[in-house]
Image: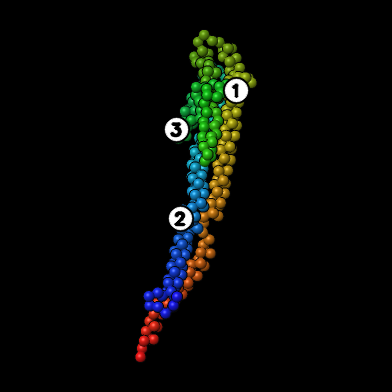
């Protein structure tokens, strides 16, 4: 094909195509720099974008699971605080009952100790009522210490982004605050003589002494409180470990996704400068090519 044509300017066509390619590449590079992503949408790389969207979904679900675990951690910590306070009161209860088991104290002293004992029992009951977190309580006031499973009740929470759950038993407060056993003790020594009507001082002293034995109400309650706190510690450690694992898993997923779709900004910056130079040269080449038909006019000058 002749290059000396006013109808077809092949040089201009080639220069324009090159300039258009440079413009498209510059647009893609500017997109990577402005978004920070090599793959910002499905048009850039459909397969990589699909993988990234799946990972983003996993990250969102795992983040939600960690939020739920954080709530359970708050419930466990609140319950542990309540039980620690109950345990402290139980120590005072034991000291008071030791005094009441002494046959040498006066009736007035016995009445004072009984009043103090009732106050401590009331305080423990208040701790049980007040030990709540976000409207929830781990303390079951109806179950007994020997209850298990559905009778005792469970707390269940989501532990990961796949919806798997972790559950643990509630605490039976009847085994901690004594309930019937402690109530029977407060019925002793309710009269001015220091003994309930129909009872004897010896029987009252014997009841208080029995409460202090290994299988007595006081030691059983203390042991149950300590066992419950030990269990709470195990539950709390599990929750902490799961939260830590979920965070590490999300960090690894984000790193993998970044390697797949993030842009190398240093590389893109250098490429942008190169494309800007190419664009300038392409514009000049197109201008020169467009002037070629004008050169043909010189052939017709006389």
What residue would you read off at disc 1? 220
x, y percent for residue 186: 51, 18
Which badge, 2 or 1, is on the more N-terminal residue? Answer: 2
What residue would you read off at disc 2? 43
What residue would you read off at disc 3? 135
Q: Quadrant of residue 200?
A: top right
| Mark-to-mark CA distance, 2 and 1 | 69 Å
Nearer the camera: disc 3 or disc 1: 3
Query: SS at mark 2?
Result: loop
x, y percent for residue 198: 52, 8
Most extreme residue toward the right, as rendered?
214
Query: SS at mark 1?
Result: helix
Q: Residue at x 53, y 64 (%)?
A: 267
Check the image and report above or below for 117 versus 256: above
Q: Quadrant of residue 232?
A: top right
Check the image and report above or below for 190 versus 53: above
Q: Tag 1: Cα neighbours inside 10 Å, few (<14), some, or many (≥20)?
A: many
| Mark-to-mark CA distance, 3 and 1 | 29 Å
x, y percent for residue 293: 39, 80
The disc at residue 275 is none
Query: SS at mark 3?
Result: loop
Which badge, 3 or 1, is on the more N-terminal residue? Answer: 3
x, y percent for residue 298: 38, 86
């Amino acid at each position: 094909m002749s290059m000396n044509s006013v109808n077809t300017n092949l040089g201009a066509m080639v220069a324009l195509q090159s300039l258009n390619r440079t413009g498209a590449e510059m647009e893609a590079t500017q997109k990577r720099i402005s978004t920070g992503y090599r793959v910002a949408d499905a048009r850039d790389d459909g397969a990589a974008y699909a993988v990234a969207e799946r990972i983003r979904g996993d990250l969102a679900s795992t983040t939600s699971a960690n939020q739920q675990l954080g709530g359970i951690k708050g419930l466990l910590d609140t319950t542990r605080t309540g039980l620690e306070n109950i345990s402290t009161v139980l120590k005072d209860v034991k000291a008071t009952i030791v005094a009441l088991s002494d046959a040498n104290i006066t009736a007035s002293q016995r009445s004072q100790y009984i009043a103090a004992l009732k106050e401590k029992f009331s305080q423990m009951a208040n701790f049980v009522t007040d030990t709540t977190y976000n409207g929830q309580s781990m303390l079951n006031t109806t179950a007994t210490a020997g209850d298990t499973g559905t009778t005792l009740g469970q707390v269940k929470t989501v532990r990961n982004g796949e919806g798997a759950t972790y559950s643990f038993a509630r605490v039976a407060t009847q085994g901690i605050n004594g309930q019937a056993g402690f109530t029977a003790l407060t019925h002793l020594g309710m009269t001015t003589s220091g003994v309930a009507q129909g009872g004897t001082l010896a029987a009252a002293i014997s009841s208080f002494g029995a409460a202090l034995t290994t299988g007595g109400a006081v030691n059983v309650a203390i042991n149950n409180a300590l066992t419950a706190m030990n269990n709470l510690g195990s539950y709390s450690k599990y929750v902490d470990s799961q939260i830590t694992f979920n965070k590490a898993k999300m960090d690894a997923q984000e790193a993998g996704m970044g390697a797949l779709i993030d842009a190398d900004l240093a590389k893109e910056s250098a490429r942008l400068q190169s494309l800007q130079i190419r664009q300038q040269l392409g514009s000049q080449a197109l201008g020169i090519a467009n002037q070629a038909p004008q050169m043909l006019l010189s052939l017709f000058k006389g």
